Image: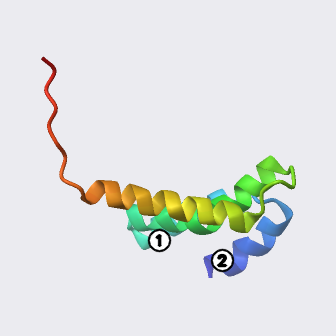
């Protein structure tokens, strides 16, 4: 329902996607998951709108964000070495 109301407006002004992401986070009550979805689905559109230079397609940006999220998850799974200053 949120998407059906806000996505048509976002076609005219992509900044509406920020509101969309915020409302989804409130409704889903799972900030981590909501942030991941926002980064995956809305951030590429916002970035391509902001950049507006024609050099980066929305799909290229989406792929870069997906890879960044994979890397972040893989780093979070590794045991942390405690490095103490000498």
The percent position of residue 43, horizontal first and vertical second, equals 64, 59
Find disc 2 in the rendering and name its residue: 3
- Quadrant in the picture for residue 77: bottom left
The percent position of residue 76, horizontal first and vertical second, equals 29, 55
Q: Is residue 33 visible?
A: yes
- Quadrant in the picture for residue 48: bottom right
Pointer 1 local density, CA inside 10 Å: few below 14, some 14–19, many at least 20: few
Q: For residue 72, which numbered disc appears in the image?
A: none
The percent position of residue 22, horizontal first and vertical second, equals 55, 60
Q: Nearer the viewer, mark 2 or mark 1?
A: 2
Pointer 2 local density, CA inside 10 Å: few below 14, some 14–19, many at least 20: some
Q: CA distance from mark 2 to mark 1?
A: 12 Å
> Is 63 left or right of 60, judged from the image as shown?
left
Looking at the rendered image, the quarter that the N terminus falls into is: bottom right
Q: Is residue 15 visible?
A: no
Find disc 1 in the rendering and name its residue: 27
> Is 74 left or right of 78, judged from the image as shown?
right
Seen at 42% across and 68% down, the residue is: 33
Seen at 71% across and 71% down, the residue is: 6
């Amino acid at each position: 329902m949120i998407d059906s109301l806000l996505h048509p407006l976002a076609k005219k002004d992509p900044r509406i996607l920020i509101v969309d992401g915020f409302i989804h986070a409130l409704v889903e009550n799972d900030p981590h998951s909501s942030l991941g979805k926002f980064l995956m689905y809305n951030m590429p559109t916002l970035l391509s709108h902001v950049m507006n230079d024609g050099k980066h397609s929305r799909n290229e940006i989406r792929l870069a964000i997906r890879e960044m999220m994979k890397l972040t998850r893989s780093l979070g799974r590794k045991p942390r070495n405690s490095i103490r200053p000498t």
